[in-house]
Amino acid sequence: MNDRDVLDLLRQALDEIQKGGKKTAEFSPSLLLSGPDSALDSLDTMLFLDSVEELVRKKAGWDVPVIDDALYAQERNHFATVQSLADHIAGLLAADPHQT
């Protein structure tokens, strides 16, 4: 899975959580996912991340730990923007032996 594939999955996840309701965020690599200026509220953020994990699992064929408790202890916030999350996921995929 390449960087474009990861961004496409993130776009799909965002579209899924906004389906049938008010569209609150336009997809962009610079879209803020956390912090006071986040485009998503806390419930939408949880739904988005859950959807991301499911879509990545389906595409990769194995459970990719996108959300991990150790992640919150790191200095860099992988959930800051769509791009930082995409970079994090790409790194997880590249580091795992399941990658095809």
Image (cartoon, helix red, strand yellow):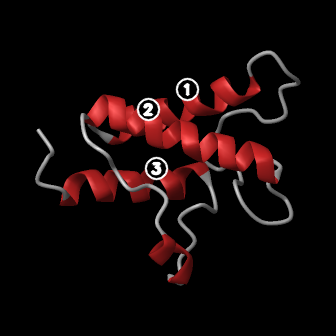
Q: Is residue 60 left or right of residue 30?
A: left
The residue that appears at 14% across and 47% down in the rendered structure is 98
Could you say where residue 100 lies in the image, as x and y percent from the top left?
11, 38
Q: Which is nearer the eye, 62 or 35? A: 62
Q: Is residue 89 above or below residue 23?
A: below
Q: Residue at x 79, y 53 (%)?
A: 42
Examine the rendered structure and indicate whether residue 7 appears above or below residue 38. Answer: above
Residue at label 2? 55
Considering only order in the chain, which callout, 1 or 3, is on the residue closer to the N terminus?
1
Q: Which residue is mark 3?
A: 86
Please state if 37 lies on the left or on the right of 74 as rendered. right
Give the labeled residue for mark 1: 12
User: Does the residue at mark 1 contact the one at mark 2 (Cβ under 8 Å)?
Assistant: yes
Q: Residue at x 58, y 32 (%)?
A: 13
Q: Secondary structure at mark 2?
A: helix
Q: Give the image quarter of residue 32.
A: bottom right
Marks 1 and 2 sit apart, C-alpha to C-alpha, by 8 Å
